Amino acid sequence: MSSRTEQSSVTVLGLGPMGRSLAGAFLDAGLRTTVWNRTPGRDGELVARGAIGARSAGEAVAASGLTVVCVVNYDAVDAIVRRGAVTGALKGRTMVNLTADTPDRARNTAAWAAEHGIGYLDGAIMTPATTIGTPAAVLLHSGPEDLYREHRPVLDALGGTHTHLGAEIGRAAAYDIALLDIFWTAMAGYAHAVAVARAEGITARQLAPFAKGIGAILPPIFEAAAGEADDGTFSGDGNPLTSAASSMAHIVATSEAHGIDAGVMRAAEGLARRAIGGGHGADGFIRIAELLGRR
């Protein structure tokens, strides 16, 4: 396969909602796109748009110099690529793994790829499937910079912002885990807030405009707290841990008065109380990151 052909073709393994969006974006960019999915029948729309439906994962990989994998987790990745025919087909080619999992799984997969002569980049998609191919997409990448630069022209077809986080292969997954920690913790808090509000006769729609206001004040708080965490200053000016713990206790009391599970907030309050007990009551809330980091 010529270098020119490799740069104008790509294979996508995994045709869930995100995989179909990835393949669709490649097609829209005019790339020769080969697709394969473990469950047959998901490639119909893509084939109708011009994709090539492969009969096997090995056949799909052999069709392109670059294979993009996006499935449910790394167990699924292993089940697909760590087989003789597929591993052999990948040798001398590059695999970009956009599957979400842990940093250690990324490192393990990279070690396997190196043993088999496979170029490997790991990545994370930080926005919904509907953003792929648009300016709103956000993708993180980690791995050898030369390999990333080589395949960046094809990856650019996915739209949005691409950030190479460095050669350490687990970096993209580490960012993904940390950022999803923020997202799902926030969504759990929002679901809990809706339950408490409804118990007090407030509908979710009535609460939503004020919830958006809370969300809007978080970015500058995040930025300030990041500086405090890195610098070890932990300023509690305006909202010390003692005040935060008192506020959280009110949430727990109101929740439990309505029979609503307050386990998450109790855990947060407990961390704040531990930090206060350690003599840090005047510090800001980000102080608990130090507490959480202790082994």
Image (cartoon, helix red, strand yellow):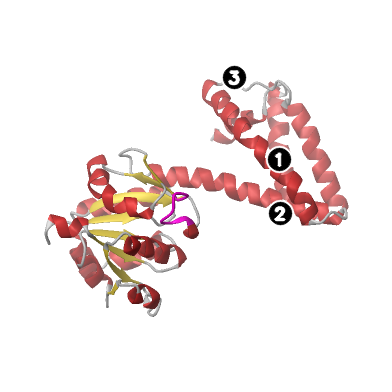
Q: Compare marks 3 and 2 and give the one earlier in the sequence.
A: 2
* Residue 35 seen: yes
Alpha carbon separation for disc pair 3 and 2 = 32 Å
* Vertical placement of residue 72 versus 96, above or below: below
Residue count near mark 2 (Cα–Cα under 10 Å), binned few <14, some 14–19, many ≥20: few
Q: Please tell me which of labels 3 and 1 falls first in the chain.
A: 1
Q: Position of residue 90 (x, y in %)?
A: 21, 61
Quarter holding the N terminus?
bottom left
Residue 133 colored magenta? yes
Residue type pointed to by label 3? Thr
Give the residue pinned by disc 2: 191
- Above or below, 20 against 160 in this view is below
User: Is 245 displayed left or right of 65 in the figure?
Assistant: right
Q: Nearer the viewer, residue 201 or 97?
A: 201
Q: Which residues are magenta?
A: 131-137
Where residue 274 appears, as percent x and y from the top left, is 70, 32
Q: Amino acid at mark 2?
A: Ala
On the image, numbered disc 1 is attached to which residue? 214
Residue 222 shown left or right of residue 209 in the figure: left
Residue tagged by mark 3? 233
Q: Are marks 3 and 2 in contact (CB under 8 Å)?
A: no
Q: CA distance from mark 3 to mark 1?
A: 25 Å
Whole-percent x, y for residue 106 in the image: 36, 50
Q: Earlier in the sequence, mark 1 or mark 2?
A: 2
